Image (spheres, grey):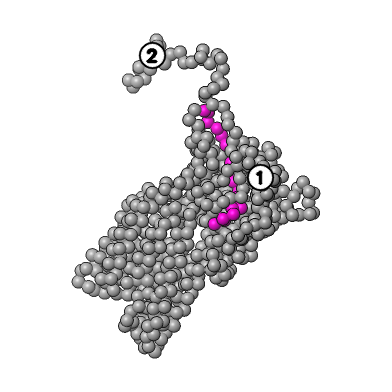
Amino acid sequence: MHPAPSIIAFTTFSGLGLGLLFWLGVDPEAPTGWIGFAFFLIGYLLAGGGLMVSTLHLGRPERALKAFTQWRSSWLSREAWTACAALIVMGLYAALLVFFGVQVHVLGWLGALLCLATVFTTSMIYTQLKTVPRWHHWSTPVLFQLYALGGGALLSGRVITGLVLIGLAALAQAGWWLGGDQRLAASGTTIESATGLGHIGRVRAFEPPHTGSNYLLREMVFVVARKHAQKLRLIALGLMAVLPALLLLLPFGHWLAAVAVLAHVAGVLVSRWLFFAEAEHVVGLYYGKR
Amino acid sequence: MTCLPEQTTRSLGLVIDLDTCVGCHACVISCKGWNTENYGAPLSDQDPYGADPSGTFLNRVHSYEVQPDNAPAQLVHFPKSCLHCQDAPCVTVCPTGASYKRTEDGIVLVNESDCIGCGLCAWACPYGARELDLAEGVMKKCTLCVDRIYNENLPEEDRTPACVRTCPAGARHFGDLSDPDSDVSRLVAERGGMDLMPEQGTRPVNKYLPPRPRDSWQGEVDVLAPFLEPVAEEPRGLLAWIDKTLEKL
């Protein structure tokens, strides 16, 4: 799949922001006043900013509001609802905390739950696609939740919880990669089943339908730079888990924590790039590619 | 509404004969011609006369080489457009309700004024039947020429999809595949019509007729064939010397 920068930025930053808001929501003694304001501002900039960026890849962004109508069948529509509900409930919770110093725990828990639900709906947009076997697996939502919870914990200053969750995310990510490499073959979709010609013999794409490129190839048959995938996987794990762990286990300092968070974010961006760039859409088989 | 209908009254669709298709691409051109001038936004081209031309097409013809174990390779031309699936994954993923499957005839359509161009339906389609038009920013797909097949301003013989009407080989057939007595259903039954990627669970309405059996290396061999068997497996004389010399180089 084409690794569109807007979608990579959206899933990474909104996941982090929603993770941070989750921890602020379940915090028994959430920060109030200016400190609380700063925390919630970061959460909203990441989550809201990510959502805004996601509209950039639309062909007709001016009609984006229509995406709220089909929640019965569409995960993308459900994501729009959960995202708005999460931001509104957490906004109310944040306003009471920051401006009145009042913490309404029920509101915080509800908002936290909605934050996780938003990350879940985002992940289901990818997981539901049978056409991309690498994504079509229960482990995809687990991975997204661990990334959001781990990154959010780091951002909210929970060092031990954050490190444990990021460690789990790294393990889940490694397992997801190894399992994902087998999934296209396991799906049973081949150029033979795509063309229905397998009963005659081996099928080879002889000639594409056109001499130039097209939307399908640009959007769904992205194969460039996959040769560096293994190196990039190691870089991603190093940046998102190993480096933050080393930095945070050193005597704690704010600037070290900031570097740890930045390294983690960079690592998540690399892994999210791979999430798209490595994903094989079955339509590629019609073009003799994968 | 992007929930799929439980049942459609009819299932209009195409039957494509892979045995007959000659790969002339006339269906591609007539499709583009009709659908650029009629229903919905035109099918735009980007850089059509430049170095990197591309454009929106609702129908494309691939060509495949099939190599049987004991027979000559075959070339199969393979037109591909929307299969108007009964369990169309492109419809249910649509967040706006722009994509829908009609209850009356099973045609899968896009209401272009509701489409936000998110592209998720194109991701959900295993067949590559949907293309986002770059000029209009909305999703385009085969409409089964919904503006032809019911169009009483056209002579009756023209009330079929443009690709079917234009095919010079008669490789494309249009009809109601839910009616077991329709011409298309009988054709599918007789020729063993098949689904593309059945494992994807989309239950396509369009069917493909497989190529009929062809020549094989066994069986009917000419009576003179034994005399044409290679006489010398190993080169001798001058050829042997050339062979040896070349080996040494």
Label 1 is placed on what type of residue? Ser
The answer to if A227 sits in the magenta stretch is: no
Q: CA distance from mark 2 to mark 1?
A: 62 Å
Tag count in the figure?
2
The earlier-in-sequence mark between 2 and 1 is 1
Q: Is residue A34 above or below residue B160?
A: below
Residue A122 pos. (x, y %): 45, 65
Q: Is residue B75 above or below residue B225?
A: below
Residue A162 pos. (x, y %): 29, 69
Name the residue beneath numbered marker 2.
Answer: B240
Residue A248 pos. (x, y %): 24, 69
Residue B185's tag is 1
Q: Is residue B136 visible?
A: no
Label 2 is placed on what type of residue? Ala
Q: Residue furthest bottom?
A: A100
The answer to if B86 sits in the magenta stretch is: yes
Q: Foreground: A84 or B18?
A: B18
As drawn, is B155 to the left or to the right of A166? right
Location of the N terminus of chain B by quadrant is bottom right
**Chain at numbered mark 2:** B
Q: Nearer the viewer, mark 2 or mark 1?
A: 1
Q: Which residues make up the magenta segment? A: B71-89
Q: Foreground: B123 or B215?
A: B215
Residue drawn at the location 25% of the way across and 65% of the way down: A245
As drawn, is B232 to the left or to the right of B126? left
Q: Residues within 10 Å of mark 1 (few under 14, many from 20)?
A: some
At numbered mark 1, what does the secondary structure look like: helix, strand or loop?
A: helix
**Chain at numbered mark 1:** B
Residue drawn at the location 37% of the way across and 13% of the way down: B241
